Image (cartoon, grey):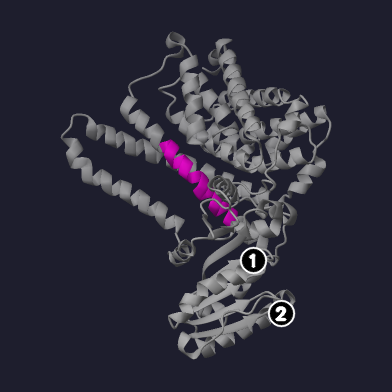
Amino acid sequence: MAPVYVISGFLDAGKTSLINMLLRRRISEGRALLLIQFEHGVEEPIDNTPRDGFLTLLRFSIKEVQRETREVAGKIYSVLIHHEPEEIWVEWNGVLSFSYLWELFPSPSGEVTGTLGDFCRIEKILYLGNGKTLEQLVAQTGGIQLEQLSNSDIVVMSNTDSASFFRRLKRNVRTWNPGVKVLPLKPLRDVERALSRPRRNRSLTLLAGIGLCVALSLMFRPVLEGWQGASNQLDILINVFLGILLQAVPFLLIGVLLSSIIQIFVSRQLIERWFPKHLAGGMLFAILAGFCLPVCDCASIPVFRSLVRKGVPMTAAVSFVAAAPIINPVAILSTWYAFNGDLSVVLCRVGLGTLCAVLIGMTFSGKASRREETSFGAPAVCCACGWYDASSPGRRFGKLFLLLRHAKLEFFEVGKYLILGAFVSALFQALYGDVSWDGEKSGLLIPLVLMMGMAFALSLCSSSDAVVARSVSNQFPMGALMGFLVFGPMMDVKNLILLSGSFSKPFILRLALTMFLVCGTVVYLAFRLGLERILS
């Protein structure tokens, strides 16, 4: 199978120059290469010389790809049969959807299908962008550039003047494509090294991590058995950890699938069109939309950013982003399941979450709040879990592919926080299982602040955080658990990262502190006024 390396990027990004630099050494080493350019008006590639290897060049226009995809694939197929290149390089047009790329180069199936998948596979996709204009370009062109960025394995940036500018740009790129390799154009050897490095398989990495944990536990069990109580604590750690995962993963999968369906098939423009512009109607619609729309906090933040840009009152927009992760159906169902069908806990979480969301929104009713909102140029239409604009162009099964890819990315992105949260919870129970925090004797304030801080650090998804909270219910009072369940989905580490790509630091700091103070105060007063007696 010949590897296919795709170089993409917008017009005048310098793709041809980069390809010339990357192919020069390969040709000098005598490799047989095929270069396919889906561009017109580009400079001539490296000249062929008999002693320097062999380079075959094919060129196709955008119209040929769009109208005659099968014919284009047939011509490439014939070249592969006659020349048998060692590597295939593709210069992809920056305004052409990747759906055509995947149709031209389908994934190998292991059987003879008469397609290019019989001879080659896409090894790496590299996106080349101008650091000074990338964010503005994404804001202007929208979905097509986001599609290319979010599906790239490597993002290379030119014109990155300073290290601080490159770090900010790298952070923003990773909100569109979490975990992507972001490199400056120079030195070129780093780009070549990234292209030659094997592609990571997240599924295998996860399975390898689980296998390593199991192997270590079996290896050190004989040693721990010699220590009094250590073996029992290890058993508790493993059992509780696996128990939390087994209970939480089904709800995480449900949340991921529903979130992906909403993000792919419900356009952001539709939400903006129906969102009322006046304060009272906006507040009411914000709560209702929070119940019906995104099921995860990282999916509600891009919608929040768009609502602010469209002139929706800041009060309503903030209320929406605060309420959506708490009052959606998946969060309600997971809370009901985690607490053994106790509707009082469910109603308490929804009621306190709604009240906190309204109060938080009301604190942003002043005109100064509008001036604090600052965009870095690119609208945050793609979150850490790979959120994609439903209005972007697709073809045939394009949206179905995006749905599956979004679900996969979100599951692995959010799943690592669930694993971390489950491990911390299991470790706490193994070490301090006999210790309980009596809220009536020692006070509620300290355990409440501790649990809210834990919620911020663990960054759990609201579709599975109730299971983690229930696992430590013997150590903490219900008031502290409710602070964990109310504040955690509103603001955590990953939300700060998402917000930092579109808002100013003063605005983010004010939002985070307001959420912490309002949630802490409301939960503390509610339980001091007798809510815990109702729940018990």
The answer to whether 384 is drawn above or below residue 518 in the figure is below
Name the one closer to the observer, 174 or 426: 174
Left or right: 75, with 289 as reference point: left
Q: Secondary structure at mark 1?
A: helix
Q: Residue at x 47, y 40 (%)?
A: 418
Q: Position of residue 322 (x, y in %)?
A: 65, 31
Left or right: 45, with 61 as reference point: left
Name the one closer to the observer, 135 or 101: 135
Quadrant of the rendered structure where residue 325 is? Answer: top right
Q: Position of residue 95 (x, y in %)?
A: 71, 65
Q: Amino acid at mark 2?
A: Glu
Q: Which residue is mark 2?
A: 68
Q: Residue at x 57, y 87 (%)?
A: 79
The answer to whether 525 is drawn above or below residue 427 in the figure is above
Is the stretch drawn in magenta largely helix, strand or loop?
helix
User: Tag count in the figure?
Assistant: 2
Q: Which residue is mark 1?
A: 98
Q: Quick one: label 2 or label 1, which is nearer the N terminus?
A: 2
The answer to whether 266 is drawn above or below residue 34 in the figure is above
Residue 287 seen in the current view: no
